[in-house]
Image (cartoon, rainbow, N blue to C red):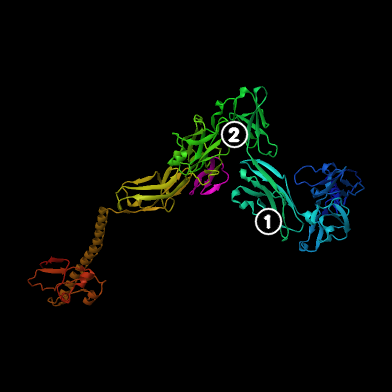
Amino acid sequence: MLRNITVAAILMLLTGVQTQHSVTLSSQSLCVVTGSTVKIPCSFTKPDQSTVTEREWYRVQSSEGEPRDLNNDPEYSGRVSVSTWWSDCELTVRNVRVSDSGVYNFRFKTQSSDWISASSGVQLTVTDLQVKVDPNTVGQREVKVTCSSTCRINTHIIYWYRNGHYIKYTNDASIVLDSTSRSDKGSYSCEVSGTEHRSPPVCVLGIECWGVTYTPEHVCALKNTSIDLSCSYKYPAGLTVIKSVWFIKVQVGVEPEDVRKDEEYQGRVQYTQSSQNDCSLRITNLRERDAQTYRFRFYTTDPTGKYTGEPGVTLSVTDLKVTVSDWYNGNKKLSCITTCSLSNNPTYIWYKNRQRVTDQDRNELYVSSGNAGSYSCAVRGHEELRSPAVCVFDEKSCWSVSYSTQTVCSLIGSSVDLHSYYTFPNNYKVTEVLWFIKELEDVRKDEEYQGRVQYTQSSQNDCSLRITNLRERDAQTYRFRFYTDDPTGKYTGKPGVTLSVTDLKVTVSDSGSGQIKLNCNTTCTLSNNPTYIWYKNGQRVSECKSASCSVAAVGGVVSYSCAVEGHDSLLSPPVYSPTNTRAVVLSSGDTVEGDSVTLSCSSDANPPVLTYSWFKQSAAADTLLTTGQNYSISNISSQHSGLYYCTAHNQLGNHTSTPTHLDVLFSKNTVLMFIMVGLFIFLALTLIPGALWMWKRKRSSANDHSSTGESGQPESDAVYENISASDHSRRVASDDQNDVHYAMSLSPRLPPDTTEEEDVQYAAVNVSRSTAAIQLVTDEEADDSSQIYSKVQKIPRQSKS
């Protein structure tokens, strides 16, 4: 017991020591301007006399890791100091920067404790000073300028500078300028007392606040390339730019026309902006006539505040050309020249017989007689824009036609470019070019290609064939041929370019684990390694971009199709799970017991249906009957009546038909049998009770006869009992009165000595008549006293002994 108390006391003592270690930060957040010196007050306590072994300020990082002492951080080198006097731990940071913004904390360690720090640090925000012009005073004589910051400026002294020179200080953060005073014009900046940083200069008044700078002012670019004309602009503070344009033509007294509206530049120009005051113009697919002087003009919220940058930027457009000159010892010097000096100091590339010369990257090439051939040049980054080839030393080697590729595969409905490059001796001139298939007939004259082919030319020695709206029969081998001004100077490039035309087709395979693999197939390998696009139920599937796509099998109706990037409208025929599934009974008429019946299932699916399943609905659970498209039943009976449905399955899913009703009718023999059984039951139920009643009545009559003889009643009296007849008027008037009942008729008893030897007894009579029959009864017939008897039985009289 004593031991437990001792341990508890020790634990409590240690806990108390730990809780008495603390760090106190007097501020939770501070906001200062750039260049200030900031002090963050701090103190700490320790309960014992143990020595502090380590103390440090650190910046709280968002990522995990050991904090870094600011004294050891090169970003704060020479700018931070920490008080070490007793329990004081104040941090001082001088010449603060915007990048110093963050959360700071202090921690210390003693001989008896681990690191102790404040529960939360101090948020330091560093912001820049800005000179702002009151927009309400723009255009007025007095313009108000304010030195502002997102932080509260505690000092009351603001230093002001104009065009970089100190002019005065104020106790207020604002000054007022005279827009008519020449001495007040210029750019202004401000500085807070006690800081080491000025605000960025802002132009407030004067023409020097307006300007457009072009970098560079002269640009030389290759034909068919793209170029960026860069510029930046400035304007007085307090104004806002509302419109800007690039233009070419200068007309006095008329606002310039935006180059984007010029038909010559439609679809080839755009404005790019990398920063607020950037004003770059991009021109693509440069042409020789694009060589112009381009100027930038902008408009501000001040009606008089508009400015045009002069003199503008001059654009020159050139192509490449190879010149040949003699060099020593019979060698040749080749020069790749342009009409202007290309910008960006390009690297040159040389080609011999269309093959790159690897050891030369300058605009000059020296060729010996042993290297005869056809030479051309290009610049790096635009290798496809080669100069016209020139023949060096051997004219025969200068006749050539080469194709960028000898096989091309393209989609039906798309367009394709077949590229050729040809060379010939310098002293010849090309007079005619053509593409043909079999005969030397220009393909443009073929009716099959009318309106679908054209020749394109990017350089003097280039001739490409463009075919649009490709068809399957366009799959041919195309050759290029050219003619020169010399009757013998003509050449055909062999073997030509073989064009294959394909469509897209999706195939489906099961990849297991409930996944389906879709493949977008073609009959040839599409050129340019295209990116594939997949669609599910008409919506693009973003995660699939290759020719294969794995999807999950589904139970509902789903469809997939594919296309290639750039030809989004040329979709493959869709593959889809079964749909429009129908179950029908194949029968020419009513289905009767004993017949044979076939139920057939049909469905629309691609790929085709793999299996059909047949079910019969029941109250408990539907029963699987069979698999297969048809379900046949032989010797059918009424038990087969009910609702039947089928389910169609393929690799993508399944679909169930609407139930169809199978009604099995009784056969004629069965109906006749039921009629006979019913008639037998009816007669049995009718005659047996009548016979029993007649038998009982006979016994009753015999008893009455004995009683009458004994009582002395005259035997000549006739007795009639229980005669029931329907009233005539009721029989005629009522459609529901169909039966006439005669209960019993008894003949008069004769004396024993009469000549009649037999008793006559009449049984019950029930005559059924239809309503129609009753209506035909006439009044005379109704009064007829004749009777109808169902049975007359004579009973022989027994002789008395």
Q: Is residue 585 left or right of residue 75?
A: left
Q: Is residue 35 visible?
A: yes
What amino acid does circle 1 point to?
Answer: Val
- The location of residue 249, given as percent across then percent down, is 65, 51
- The location of residue 348, given as percent across then percent down, is 66, 33
Label 1 to label 2: alpha-carbon separation: 43 Å
- The location of residue 3, given as percent across then percent down, is 84, 45
Q: SS class of the residue under badge 1? A: loop
What amino acid does circle 2 point to?
Answer: Pro
Q: SS class of the residue under badge 2? A: loop
Q: Is residue 653 above or below residue 133?
A: above
In the image, residue 684 lies in the stretch drawn in magenta: no
Few, some or many residues within 10 Å of mark 1 (<14, 14–19, 20+)? few
Tell me the residue that label 2 is attached to: 388
Tell me the residue that label 1 is attached to: 252
Q: Nearer the viewer, residue 563 or 508?
A: 563
Range of the magenta residues?
534-562
Q: Nearer the viewer, residue 94 or 509?
A: 94
- Could you say which quadrant of the image residue 674 lies in? bottom left
- Could you say which quadrant of the image residue 331 lies in? top right
Q: Is residue 796 left or right of residue 535?
A: left
Q: Nearer the viewer, residue 118 or 573?
A: 573
